[in-house]
Image (spheres, grey):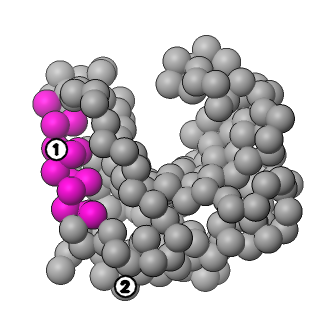
Amino acid sequence: MKNDWGPLIPTGETSEDWRFEVVHDMISDRRNPSYRGSQFKSDDAWVIGMYKKNTEFEDIIFEFLICYNKDGKEKYYLKLKVEMYECAFRDPERKTKSWNMNPLKEDFLKKWETKFTGLGWEKTQESGKAPPHNSISVLKFEEKVEGEGKENLIRFREALIAAAKSIDETGWLKD
């Protein structure tokens, strides 16, 4: 897995506040219902989270997801999600706070949508699912070239660096 995602990680080019976590790898998460969708059937599928330390909004964070689905297509993609810092379903108080995710998404898009779409990101569809939920998608960045070519890794890395630098400079929601 490190051979696949190592080149994507923008270390040294952003602030040291960015953290990375393995959110999902198919081999160890076979029973995780969050990742049972068709995009994660392959044994080589994985998701890495990239978030900025100490930027929670009352148990809610913004997190970039770096995803790889080898399922016959060998496809990389990025997502920006608003997520509960810990599972919303384990704590009744967090269930209530998950209602705050949609307003945070809307505030983020008011501030950042033009900047991010100018960098190749696309706004995701509105979720028809009512809270409580653990996450909602905000933006996505998909490869334009099929396959596992170096061009895609370079484009994804550049997109992550540009996004992280923008967030470093002005914060997630500050004016």
Q: Which residues are magenta?
A: 96-109
| Residue 15 visible within the image | no
The crowd level at tag 1 (other Cα within 10 Å; few <14, some 14-19, many 20+) is some
- The residue beneath circle 2 is 169
Q: Nearer the viewer, residue 37 or 83?
A: 37
Residue at horizontal 18 percent and vertical 80 percent from the top:
175
Percent position (x, y) of residue 130? Answer: 22, 27
| As drawn, 140 above or below 38 | below
Identify which amino acid the numbered label 1 is placed on.
Asn
In the picture, measured across the screen, residue 52 lies left or right of residue 61, that is right
Mark number, residue 9: none
Q: Secondary structure at mark 1?
A: helix
Q: Nearer the viewer, residue 14 or 17?
A: 14
Tell me how far mark 2 sits from mark 1, CA to CA: 24 Å
> Does the magenta portion include 64?
no
Percent position (x, y) of residue 47? Answer: 63, 43
Mark number, residue 100: 1
